[in-house]
Amino acid sequence: MSEVTYRALQAALRMRGEIVAVAADIDPATTKRLSAQWKEWDPGIPLAVLPCPHRSLVSTLVG
């Protein structure tokens, strides 16, 4: 995971409440690798993978 991801999670944890990391499944192979890396890293925050059938991050996150 990147330094940006780490910092974003730290900021979210300071805000308290329910925290869920979100990834859009634009490329299944990339999503599989990300999920495996997330599980190995185990930051204590769940990763929700959202289907992205139209390969549009915006419509996936807003919809």
Image (tube, rainbow, N blue to C red):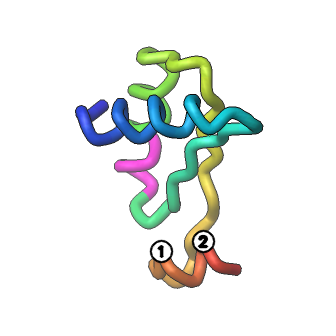
Q: Are marks 1 and 2 in contact (CB under 8 Å)?
A: yes
- When the figure is inspected, residue 39 is found, relative to residue 48, above or below; the finding is above
Label at residue 61: 2
* Location of residue 35 in the rendering, given as x and y in whole percent from the top left corner: 49, 35
- Mark pair 1, 2: CA separation: 6 Å
Left or right: 6, with 46 as reference point? left
Residue occupying the point 45% across, 29% down: 10
Query: Callout 2: helix, strand or loop?
Result: helix
Label 1: how many residues lie within 10 Å, few (<14), some (14-19) or many (20+)? some
Residue 7 is left or right of residue 45, and the answer is: left
Q: Can you identify the residue that label 1 sits on?
A: 57
Point out the stretch of residues depicted in magenta.
28-32
Image position, residue 5 (x, y; %): 35, 38
Image quarter of residue 7: top left
Q: Residue at (67%, 38%) from the top-left corner?
A: 19
**Which SS type dominates the magenta stretch?**
helix
Label 2 crowd bin: few (<14), some (14–19), many (20+), radius 10 Å: few
Q: Viewer-proximal residue, 46 or 29?
A: 46
Q: Which is nearer the eye, 9 or 41?
A: 9
Residue 23 position within the rendered picture, expressed as x and y whole percent measured from the top left: 51, 53
Which quadrant of the structure image shows residue 28?
bottom left
Q: Amino acid at mark 1?
A: Leu
Q: Classify residue 5 as left or right of residue 63.
A: left
Dot 2 amino acid type: Leu
Residue 37 or 20: which is nearer the viewer? 20
Q: Please identify the quadrant where the N terminus is shown.
A: top left
